[in-house]
Image (tube, coloured by chain):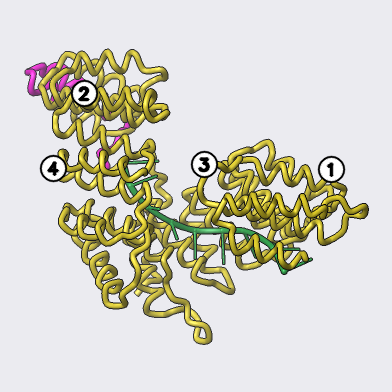
Chain colours: A yellow, B green
Amino acid sequence: MMHLFVSLLQKHFTEPTKILQIHALLITSGFFLLPNPNQSHTIAFNCLIQSYLRQRTPKPKPPDAPLRLFLQLLSFGAQPNHHTFPSLLKSSSSSPLIGTSIHGQTLRRGFVLDDFIGCSLIKFYAQLGRFLDAKKVFDEMPHPDLASCNAMLDVLCACHDMGAAYKFFQSMSIRDIASWTTMINGFSKNGSYSSAIQLFRRLIHEGENVFAKIRPNEATFVSVLSACASLGDREGLAVGTEIHAHFIQRQIHLTAFLGTALIDLYGKHGHLYSCENIFKAIIQKEVCTWNAMISALACNGGEENALQMFDRMQSDGVVPNHITLLAVLTACSHAGLVDLGVQHFEAMVSKYGLTPLMKHYGCMVDLFGRAGLLHKAMNFIMQMPFEADESVWGALFGSCKLHGNAELGAYVGQKLLNLEPWYGGWYKTLRNIYAEAGRWQNVVEMRENMNLTGAKMVAGKSYVNSTCTAGNPIQHHLI
DNA sequence: ATAGGGTTAG
């Protein structure tokens, strides 16, 4: 009988209604009324936990179903086993308190040497940004297996410690496609786009293992395409187009992941026509797909189409998220549609139930600022529910320069110099604003201040950890 | 019979 339930659950794990029905069947069958809880009951609970974890549609799904099932399992008197905890930890990713108590449970019940649990714990702590805890779990594993090493590699990448990450990757005695993908994605996420592409090339040429050839899969392609999208210089577009051609040759199905990565690639390189073709070819569009398309249009002069897309998306029943609204506000800002932008911003809370984040405020400041409504932008900053950061002030600063407002520019520039004194770009812009206004005394002061604080005129932002980009060991190993 | 790691939009 148990086999039947297990196979039923596995077959229908994407269908929430069916899971509920099977769960109900399991209850009404009296299976949980037997006097002596045994291994079978534990397996039944494990399968149910897994089923609720894996179902996709979030609508009727109670988010804490796996945890509640775990509590039912305990109160029923069954014993959780080493299969129970990985799923539980996966379901607790957003709740530090629950996850750490589950960690405690595993320790108290003596599951200290289990690779699956260790691996889940590494990922759990990494998702919370508790990288030291993740590393501690890994270090305490006597013989971590491949999956645990891959999780640890991802932790090092998430810490921006790319030197250590690459060293770790090189030191691994066995690697699979997930190891390669993690490393490629790590480079990409840390701005080392060329390294990501070079490592991808090495994967293609070497394939690593003589016995079992390692080939890139969907995740690998998506990671390298993301690097290609961000790498300007035409190199990114060339490699990305090559990969796209490979998909066409092999008639590879355009999943939402692959398609979205391609739309992003062509969008970032200004090829709107390709974006639209790919968009049409994606059968199962997800919210990310729409977002990538709306962003591509909003950033390449297709503002009107972007806003139409936003409507189409909603009539297709796709629910907009924070990133959608960011793209929509960008479209309004670029098109100078101030009133419409304000309407969409207000609709965020009232219509979509989305709380505006720092980036949305930055967009609104840009919207007002570009349109020359500098004081409206300034008032908007003053009415923000939290302190504006450098991106928001930076948006206003750009508008001050655009419209030659030295008075407000000086005030905003000072704000930015306080926030990021090490970033030379602010000094330069402020100096230019002063120069255009003929305030030569201020120009001289700017130069002195910059020398005094030791700010650098570097490309890119200062908060990128220099160890990820500089002294990258990969240069010596590739090709 | 039941479990873990790597992927998209800002």
Which is nearer the eye, A262 or A282?
Answer: A282
Between label 4 and label 2, give the one nearer the viewer: 4
Between label 4 and label 1, give the one nearer the viewer: 1
Q: Which mark is residue A446?
A: 2
The image position of residue A70, as x and y in percent, is 75, 46
Mark 1 chain: A
Q: Is residue A184 left or right of residue A127?
A: left
Q: Label 4: which residue?
A: A301
Quarter of the image for the N terminus of chain A: give it: bottom right
The image position of residue A68, as x and y in percent, is 72, 41
Q: Label 3: which residue?
A: A59
Mark 4 element type? loop
Mark 4 chain: A
Mark 3 element type? loop
Query: Is A102 covered by the magenta stretch?
Result: no
Mark 1 element type? helix
Q: Label 1: which residue?
A: A75
Mark 2 chain: A
Q: CA distance from mark 1 to mark 2?
A: 69 Å
The dominant secondary structure in magenta is helix
Query: Is A441 covered by the magenta stretch?
Result: yes
Kindly indicate whether the residues beneath marks 4 and 1 are on one polypeptide chain: yes
Mark 2 element type? helix
Mark 3 chain: A
Label 4 environment density (alpha carbons within 10 Å; few <14, some 14–19, many ≥20)? some
Residue furthest right as drawn:
A35
Q: Which residue type carries mark 4?
A: Gly
